[in-house]
Every structure is written in C-alpha cells, then in structure tokens.
Image (tube, rainbow, N blue to C red):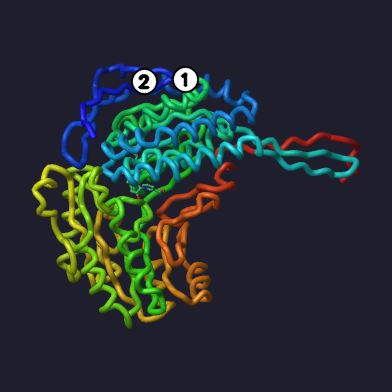
Amino acid sequence: MTQDTMSLDMYVHGEWRAGSTGDVVEVINPAKGELLATVPNGSQEDLDAAIESAQEGFEVWRNTHPRVRGQIIYRIAETLKERAPEFAELYSLNSGGSIGTGMWTMNDVAGRRFEYYAGMADKIRGDSFVTPGQFLSYTLREPVGVTGHIVPWNGPLWIGSRTIAPALAAGNSVVVKPSSEAPITLLKFAEMAIECGLPPGVLNVVTGRGSGLGDLFTRHPGLDGIYFTGSTATGRRIMENSAGNPVRTVMELGGKSPNIVFADAGMEEALAGAILAIFANSGQICVAGSRLLVEESIHTEFVGRLAEMAKDITIGGPEAEALMGPVITARQKERVLDYIEQGKSVAELVAGGGTPSDPDLQAGFFVEPTIFDGVPNDASIAQEEIFGPVLSVSTFADQDEAIAMANDTQYGLASAVWTQNVMRAHQVAGELRAAQVYVNHYYTAAFEVSRSPYKASGHGVSEGPDAIFEFLNQKSVSIKTGEPPAW
Ligand code: NAD
C-alpha cells in the first residue's frame, strides 16, 4: 500500500470544485499518524453552490423514469463491487480498518444496499380508497427534495450508503457532508456514481469541519431533510440547529449495547461473540457490545477465558488483517485511555489497560484490548459511549435482573442474547429497548428488515423496505365522483 499525500477538492455538480477560501482540513492516516490528504474546509459559499446544484439535480432526477433510476443505482452497486479493492484501500488508509473489513463493506454492505434499493425504485406506489358514489382518494408518494446527509468517520460508505441509497431510489437529490476525519471514500464514490449515469447535481459532497461547515449545513434553508449518523451530542446540536427551519430529521446516534450471556448459552460461541462484539474495529462500531452481562453461575470461568482470549487478539495496521486497528485520532486515543484510568478506580482490570508495546505501533493511535470486571452499572465506563476497545463486565442473578440492567442506559441501539432456550430468547428480545437484538450471534444483521432506535440513540427508520418512507412525502388527493349526502 502506498501513501502519497492526496490533495482533493469537493465534488459538486459532477465536477471537482476547489474551496472558495483556500483553507484546508488535514486528514491523518490513523495507523501511522501521518498526513494522508487535504480537503477544502468548505464555506457558506461552497455549501450554497452544492445545494443549488442539488436543487437542479432534483428537478432532473424526480422526473427520471423510476425504472431508469433503478438501473443507474444498480450500476452503482455493480461498479462499487468491481472497484471494491480500490475503495477498500481508501477506507483502510483513512479509517484504519483492515482491507478485509473494507472489502466486506464495499461488497456486502454498501454494494448490497445500492442493489437492494435499486430494486425498490420502481415499486414505490400509493394507496387508493373509494367512497362509493362520492370520492376517489389516493396517495401520491413524492420525493422529499434536497436531502442532507451527515456521516461519521467509522464507515463513510458502510454508513453513508444506508441513507444515500434509499434517498436516490425515492427520487431525491443528495448533499453529503462526510466527517472531516474521513472524507476520501465518499468523495471518490460521488465521482464514480456520476460516471455510472447519475445526472450532475444528484449527488454532491462538501467537506469541512463539523463545528464550522456542519453548523452552516444543518441551518441551511435549502435542505428539505437531514439524515444524520453520529454521536448523540452532535445529534442534539443538529436538532437545535434545524429547529429554526423545521425539516424532517432522521437521527442514528450513539449506543452502549448490552451483550447478555445466560448460563445455558453455547460457551464457545458466546466467548467468540463477546470478543468480536467489542474488539472488532477496535470497538469503534455504533452497535459494539461494550457492556457484557454474564449470569453469575458461569461468570468466573467465562471472564477468565475471555481475559486469556484478549491476550491473543491481533493488533496492527490495515495490511496486518488484525482484528484490531488503530483508533481514529490521537485525541480519541487519549479519551479512551482516560476512560481506562476511570475504570481502574471502580472495577477490576483483567486485560489490557494501556497501549501495545510493539515498536511498529508507536506512531499510530493504538490501544490494547481492555476488559474490566465487576463494573457497577452506574459507572461511567458502563454508561458512557467510549467508542474504543474497552469492555465492561457485570453479572446478573436471573432473567429479570439481566433485562433490568440491560435497559438501564440512556441508549437503545443494539443488544444481544446468548441462550439455547428459545422461549427465553423471545422473551428477552421482546423486553429489550433497543433497535436490534442479536440472538446467538453478534453483528450479522439483515439489511432487509427495518428498525428504529430507542431513547438517546435517535429516531426514524433505517434499513429494509420501511426506510424508504423517510425519503418520501405522502400527499392525499381526493376527487369528487358524486354528490355526498348532506351531513
Ligand atoms: P460525531 O458526532 O463527532 O460526527 C459525526 C458527523 O457529524 C461528522 O461528519 C462530523 O463532522 C459532523 N458534525 C460534527 N459536529 C457537527 C455540527 N455541529 N453540525 C453538523 N455536523 C457536525 O461522530 P463521529 O466521531 O464521527 O462518529 C462516532 C459516533 O457516531 C459514535 O457516537 C457512534 O455511536 C455514532 N455512530 C452511530 C451509528 C448508528 O448507526 N447509530 C453508526 C456509526 C456511528
């Protein structure tokens, strides 16, 4: 893998567009701590240009036959899969995940989503209702308009595709603001999508810092909807910003997901699942299983084995194909280490607790896989999203206590249950207040079914057939067909 510093512009109306001020944001390779690229730090003028482009693009796209829209979106899916190695490398350089994760992201996540919503483009229909001799009423399902998408750094395409694909299928135009930490993949993707036949203006990418361009973006009166994925704190700020110009918002925010292991679980699968749940991508996954709740009777053996397994976890840069890569920034590394220090004062450290000693990993932002046992449920490491490789383990006596502890959090994004008792699995799944429940596995979600976050994890529908409604306005039309009776 080569690493020459890239200098990229924004992508607006099917062209590369330099920033109006010349100010840039530096993008760092987290595995090496080196400058990877610069992108413009976008201004109001740049944003206005992108939104104007999207308004023009919208007029073309909404009037494009839905079948043709579907064909173009399908071409995007196929091209992304063909070019997966190139996009996987960009993802790895910028977000720090392994090339294997990048390939899976392009083929089985982002590629799959564009494929899925391509098929939906010409299946958006309304309902009709006849009041005999009086009215014919029907719904028109129309695109929302210019949709603004704000995407976190941890999966620019893997997360970005979740809103961009259905937005396009429903006939909307899109302006994306990627994270200033990881803008490269989405910029290159926009160019690829236009080459696949998307009309200019239908997909635009603006770059800049969240605290500057992000605030301008979410206050912009030209947006008809805001689709945000990121932290709960930023989500709250965006809702405040957009309140002055009330538009539809969909919020996919943070999590602190419980992973519940009952004594009757398959021990080997549950151990492997618990490791994957928190240490894959160094815990930087919104649905990471960061709280492990273990039934008392198996706790000693389970945690002992987990701590042994943590010692064998591979850590390295993207080429190493390790389970754990770096965390995204030097600042995030300090934040994670600070949480580890807090953990040491309230719980027992049973694995990790610092940075790896390997000399090759000193320049990058690496943290050891860390496990705390006996964590009180009200401790900061059990309640706050760390977004790093830190696992909090607590025990429970029975099913009711497990459910109560699992739900005792401000978040409601994901959860998992490990048991061989099918009745218990359904009972617990029904009681958990979370958008996703994994039973006897972790992470393997079906994109084809819809879900909504609970509590501080956000609102709105993601994935599957129902997500399309977040990108449509519903209009009812009633036609008088006869004389209604007098009231
Ligand atoms: P973040 O909230 O710091 O940033 C997310 C995006 O918001 C970035 O593009 C950033 O530039 C932008 N932003 C920041 N301030 C802004 C502002 N004032 N106005 C508008 N935009 C602004 O999150 P992050 O560190 O990039 O990502 C990690 C967070 O994202 C974690 O909390 C994680 O749980 C969450 N996340 C959630 C999901 C999900 O599906 N629910 C998926 C991935 C990540």
Asked which secondary structure carries label 2, the reply is helix
* Horizontal and vertical percent position of residue 395: 31, 75
Rendered view: 276 above or below 197 = below
Asked if the beta carbon under badge 2 is closer than 8 A to the nearest atom of ligand 1, the reply is no
Q: Pick the residue in front: 89 or 208.
A: 89
Q: Counting residues from the N terminus, which is met first, the one under dot 2 or under dot 1?
A: 2
Q: Residue at x 51, y 47 (%)?
A: 463
* Horizontal and vertical percent position of residue 43: 32, 23
Which amino acid, by three-letter code, is at mark 2? Asp
* Horizontal and vertical percent position of residue 288: 35, 56
Quarter of the view holding residue 150: top left
Q: Residue at x 43, y 47 (%)?
A: 252
* Farthest bottom residue in view: 297
Q: Pick the residue in front: 19 or 426.
A: 426
Asked which secondary structure carries label 1, the reply is helix
How much space separates mark 2 and mark 1, taking CA atoms?
A: 10 Å
Determine which of the numbered discs, if any, sits on residue 259 in the image: none
Quarter of the view holding residue 317: top left
Determine which of the numbered discs, if any, sits on residue 46 in the image: 2
Which amino acid, by three-letter code, is at mark 1? Glu
Q: Dividing the image into 4 quarters, which one contains the N terminus? A: top left
* Horizontal and vertical percent position of residue 432: 46, 66
Q: Residue at x 43, y 26 (%)?
A: 192
Determine which of the numbered discs, if any, sits on residue 52 in the image: 1
Asked if the beta carbon under badge 1 is closer than 8 A to the nearest atom of ligand 1, the reply is no
Rendered view: 340 above or below 22 = below
- Quick one: label 2, few (<14), some, or many (20+) residues within 10 Å? many
- Quick one: label 1, few (<14), some, or many (20+) residues within 10 Å? some
Q: Are marks 2 and 1 in contact (CB under 8 Å)?
A: no
Q: Ligand 1 shows up in which quadrant of the image?
A: top left
Q: How many marks?
A: 2
